[in-house]
Image (cartoon, grey):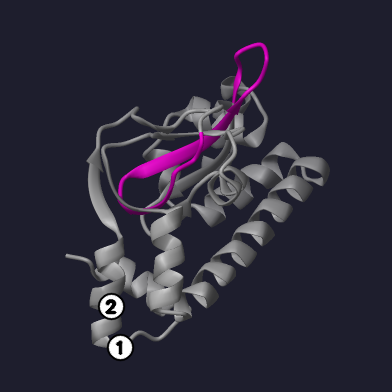
Amino acid sequence: MHQLILNNFALHVALAPHEQEQALAFFQLREVKKRTWLLHAGKNGRYIYFVKSGCLRMLYTDKSGEEHNIGFYPENWWVCDIVSFFNEKPASNAIQTLENSEVYYISLPQLETLFQTIPKFERFFRILTQNGFELYQRRITSQLYKSAEERYLEFRKCHPGLEQRIAQKHIASYLGITPAFLSMMRKESRV
């Protein structure tokens, strides 16, 4: 039942069986319907989420009301507005489910207790943060210097099969292009 998250922990730390049980006790599991908001911009991000099934997105809404997708988080990915979560400040971004999903979640006080109970988790979350920062930095560089076609191919490589699961408008927003241009690129890439 909990194998996916345990396997995720094992990517960066080795846990004894009793530590696995202890760690799981800190997380809650929740089923979430498609289009549910887990975080609204302007609210404090109280949880960090691990996606057991389904897919989430993080987005920023500009002053004109246009949504800009920052990232997609399918199975086996972690997501939170990191500034809001760790600094207990209002979030700049929002998090929404794109599919019916199951997520594990943990609050900051519980995470701090987990760090004290099983210190290996400080290493685990440090590595997650480093990897997330690297991904974020690559995304910014990609937006600045790569063509739309290159960004699309990079998206497909990073998220294989995801484009069949989520709306084209969300992918286009993530790539910084229109849905019509994305449709044209997709047709050309099938040739």
Say which residue label 2 marks.
20
Q: Residue 89 appears at what percent x and percent y?
A: 59, 39
Q: What amino acid type should be assigned to the residue bearing mark 1?
A: Ala
Q: Residue 96 appears at what percent x and percent y?
A: 42, 33
Q: Residue 36 appears at what percent x and percent y?
A: 33, 29
Which residue range is magenta in the image? 44-67
Direction from residue 3 to residue 136 in the image, left or right: right
Secondary structure, mark 2, is helix
- For residue 63, what is the image quadrant? top right
Residue at 40% from the left image edge and 86% from the top image edge: 14
Label 2 crowding class (10 Å Cα cut-off): few <14, some 14-19, many 20+?
some
Q: Residue 70 appears at what percent x and percent y?
A: 60, 39
User: Is residue 42 in the magenta section?
Assistant: no
Q: Depth check: 78 or 159 in front?
A: 78
Asked if 57 appears above or below 117 in the picture, the reply is above
Q: Depth check: 159 or 137 in front?
A: 137
- Tell me the chief SS of the magenta region: strand
Secondary structure, mark 1, is loop
Q: Which mark is residue 62?
A: none
Q: Depth check: 143 or 149 in front?
A: 143
Q: Which mark is residue 16?
A: 1
User: Does the image show residue 77?
Assistant: no
User: Is residue 57 in the magenta section?
Assistant: yes
Q: What amino acid type should be assigned to the residue bearing mark 2?
A: Gln
Asked if 39 appears above or below 180 in the picture, the reply is below
Direction from residue 87 to residue 114 in the image, left or right: left
Q: Quadrant of the N terminus?
A: bottom left
Label 1 crowding class (10 Å Cα cut-off): few <14, some 14-19, many 20+?
few
Label 2–label 1 contact, CB within 8 A = yes
User: Does the image show residue 154?
Assistant: yes
Rounded to the nearest angstrom, the CA distance separating label 2 from label 1 is 6 Å
Q: Depth check: 65 or 90 in front?
A: 90
